[in-house]
Amino acid sequence: MMSILSVLLCLGLSLDQRTGVQAGTLPKHIIWAEPGPVIPYGNLVTIWCQGTRGFKVYSLYKDKSPAPWYKPKPLEPGEKAKFSITHMTEHDAGIYHCYYHSTAGVSERSDPLELVVTGAYSKPSLSALPSPVVTSEGNVTLQCGSWEGFGRFILTKEGDHRLFWFLDSQPQASGQSQALFHVGPVTPIHRWTFSCYGCYRDRPQVCSHPTDILELLVPGESGKPSLLSQQGPIVASGQNLTLQCRSDVGYDRFALHKEVGQDLPQSLVLQPQAGLSQAHFPLGTVSSSHGGRYRCYGGYNLSSVWSAASTPLDIMVAGHLPNRPSLSVKPGPRVASGENVTLLCQSQSPRDTFLLSKEGAADPPLRLRSEHRAQQYQAEFSMSPVTSAHWGTYRCYSSHSSSPFLLSLPSESLELLVAGAGDTLSPSPSRSDPKISEWETSSDMGSHPQDYTVGNLIRMGVAGLVLVVLGVLLFEARHNQRRTHDEDRG
């Protein structure tokens, strides 16, 4: 004899296949998936069905399938049934419903569960508009886009309970397809970490690899870290660029943000040393896209609150404009401390901005608007009065205000020598000589003797050492002479 369970199951299958399940006799129940409805290819997923109390048989159906996809499993505690897919593939993707059967009839079907498999196509991109840096209780728009022609996008939020949003894509004039997800209000209570997937319209449950993770930053008021470039603020195309974010606060992780352009990933701090926590962000080979304004933030693993933003760091890429400018100095490259000195940057090509950079300086380069004089575009950088701190090697660059982070090739270097009080300077050619220009450039510097303050100090030190040695030798000789005299008298 067939068991009551088998009879009920057969009854349910018969009703489903012949009459589409005479639903409505019993209330519907709940269906959900763990760890969620969006599953990477090959991973395990569990589908749960939960109903009311009473003897019943659960059945799991997949749309467009003529029969139950799975045999009913023994009931779990709490009046729920468990159905497992051990190896998720595109054949398992689809829309599922649960029914249960009892002597009173067949239940309504559950709400649909859309099961999606990911990893079939290349990943789209995910960015935050206008920025991933969001004030507390603020709103933000997340843009998921691709050139693959996806028909819809799925946005997932990581956390204690994964959340999912589905949107049809909107084609753009550029040919890219995209969807805009409006998120907020953003609070620092939870971490706001997102990924996005793209799917085609004819296979809406088979989707792409996930985008890189995007985490929204909610700045707090804790101590801001510092951000610096190991290569300096001006870098050349083809050079490798690494930014370093560090703090004397023991942060567990750091996030790097670029104001305009592609958002950058966060980096974890694994081994803080000597009380200094830091993270290195290798940004790869420099191209024009690396130019921009950067900030970094520090945070803790168990908290969603980030630090205050670091002081902004401007990264400028040299070599993207032809024609390098020229750099000259007035009154000359060798000056005394306290004099008035002006560095002149010039270009025959139309330029609206000039920048003056000092080699090895931690400060950003000086920036001035250009003036058009005598068929030249130029800017005068005044250093009045100069001190020993101005001693160094200088270069200048030109740029357009429309692309402030893309610079020309650098000028030839110019070394400025500043003599301190009491130092002597070698005589320079007379300014009345018509063959000598009022402006001396870096090419003039090899033709004049150079009396450095450091050189004078070295010479004085050597002379003092010689005097000390002579004094010791004289004392030794006098002592030996006196001892010989005493011995003769004895």
Image: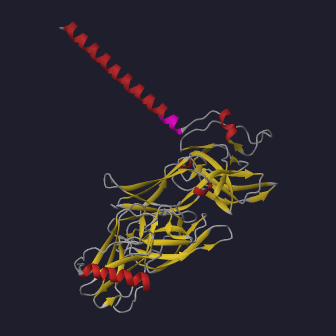
Task: Choose top left, top right, bottom left or bottom right for residue 217.
Answer: bottom left
The percent position of residue 24, horizontal first and vertical second, equals: 38, 92
Residue 332 at least partly seen: yes
Numbered-mark total: 0
- Specify the color scheme: secondary structure
In the shown orientation, is residue 113 left or right of residue 261? left
In the shown orientation, is residue 439 left or right of residue 375? left
Say above or below: 295 vs 55. Answer: above
Query: Which residue is painted at 69% across and 38% down in the image?
Result: 443
The percent position of residue 150, horizontal first and vertical second, equals: 58, 68
Per the rendered image, the range of residues in magenta is 453-457
Say above or below: 268 vs 54. Answer: above
Q: Would you say residue 333 sits in the magenta stretch?
A: no
In the shown orientation, is residue 181 left or right of residue 441? left
Q: Quadrant of the C terminus?
A: top left
In the shown orientation, is residue 49 left or right of residue 3? right
Task: Choose top left, top right, bottom left or bottom right for residue 62.
Answer: bottom left
Query: Which residue is painted at 68% across and 33% down in the image?
Result: 447
Most distant residue in the left direction: 490
Residue 309 at least partly seen: no
Most distant residue in the front direction: 1
Q: Quadrant of the N terminus?
A: bottom left
Query: Which residue is painted at 63% across and 51% down in the image?
Result: 318
The percent position of residue 454, horizontal first and vertical second, equals: 51, 37
Please tell me which residue lies in front, 261 or 488: 261
Please tell me which residue lies in front, 435 or 88: 88
Please tell me which residue lies in front, 237 or 193: 193
| Predominant SS along the magenta part | helix
The percent position of residue 377, horizontal first and vertical second, equals: 76, 55
